[in-house]
Image (tube, helix red, strand yellow):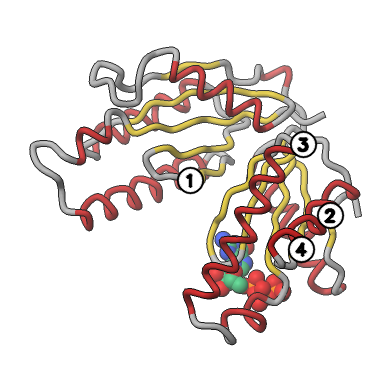
Amino acid sequence: MSNTQVTLIQIDNYGPWTVTPAPRREVDLQTMQSRLFADLSQHFGMQGGYAFFTRFDNMVAITNGMDLEDHARIQESVRNRYPVTVSFGVGHDERPARALVEATAQLQDEGSAQDEQRTEVLRGQPIEDDERTDSDVQIAHYDVVDATGKYTDELDAFSTFIQIEQGYASLMRHLHDEHGSLAFFVGGDNIIALTSGMDDAAFEETVTYVREDADVELQVGVGHGATAHDAGMAAKHGLETCRERGTHIEGEFC
Ligand SMILES: Nc1nc2c(ncn2[C@@H]2O[C@H](COP(=O)(O)OP(=O)(O)OP(=O)(O)O)[C@@H](O)[C@H]2O)c(=O)[nH]1
């Protein structure tokens, strides 16, 4: 049984900061946000985690294997190097979507994202050491079949972007609503989904759903591991096998 640990990352009181004392230059905000994401990706990645940029002011990380002290060190590093601070809410559950609901509640219980008193919150219950297993994290790595041939080399860049985003929107909503899973766009035509308890039939169903709903053909590799890194690498290998065989589903279940 999976046991996903996720961390909700929120930039503290960011909205007011972007307009204080006057609206800040957009390029500076974009640069700061993307550098902060890059840093967090590296910090969490050094400990086997994955971070996803989602909305940039709110980000999500898979943090199986990390305790609250590990999180606190990252908060300190951000505080020392950035003009903003970050709060972390941690949750875990068999279902990734429920884990994120729990992580969100940890921050919401402490006040608003735009409360200037609410800074560097660090709350939640990481998975105890003796409760961890080698297969707590299940990751599904989806990508669009022949995105280069069908879209990138054929359509103008914005039409391609629309197609890829439509496929992502369809998949993320379906995985969330029907499977309690969380899907994150990671660039190109790639989507990394945090899933649990989904078998090969369920993955096949998601591919069929997106084909019918958004007219986008996906393939998916699935992996398990103690951490996001382990599960994610296994999923990437599954996807490679899938490409070689020309089938659209590959992974531990296939
Ligand atoms: N984040 C991320 N992006 C990737 C990865 N692999 C490929 N990409 C991106 O996806 C784009 C398309 O690459 P592919 O998915 O290999 O190309 P494709 O034309 O869809 O071919 P097939 O996937 O083999 O059907 C690349 O330009 C990269 O931007 C990956 O593992 N992670």
Residue under pointer 3:
196
Residue under pointer 4:
211
Secondary structure under the numbered disc 1 in the rendered image: loop
Q: Is residue 10 above or below residue 161?
A: above
Quadrant placement of the C terminus: bottom right
**Number of residues whose C-alpha sits closer than 10 Å to that of mark 1, classed few (under 14), some (14–19) or many (20 or more):** some
Lateral position of residue 34 relative to residue 243, left or right: left
Amino acid type, residue under disc 1 in the picture: Thr
Please provide percent x and percent y for residue 246.
85, 74
Residue under pointer 1:
54
Q: Real-space Cα distance between discs 4 and 1?
A: 24 Å
The front one of 187 and 165 is: 165
Point out the frontmost of discs 2 and 1: 1
Q: Earlier in the sequence, mark 4 or mark 3?
A: 3
Residue under pointer 2:
251
Secondary structure under the numbered disc 4 in the rendered image: helix
Residue shown at 60% from the left, 53% from the top: 169
Please provide percent x and percent y for residue 107.
44, 20
Q: Earlier in the sequence, mark 4 or mark 1?
A: 1
Amino acid type, residue under disc 4 in the picture: Arg
Residue shown at 27% from the left, 29% from the top: 13
Secondary structure under the numbered disc 2 in the rendered image: strand
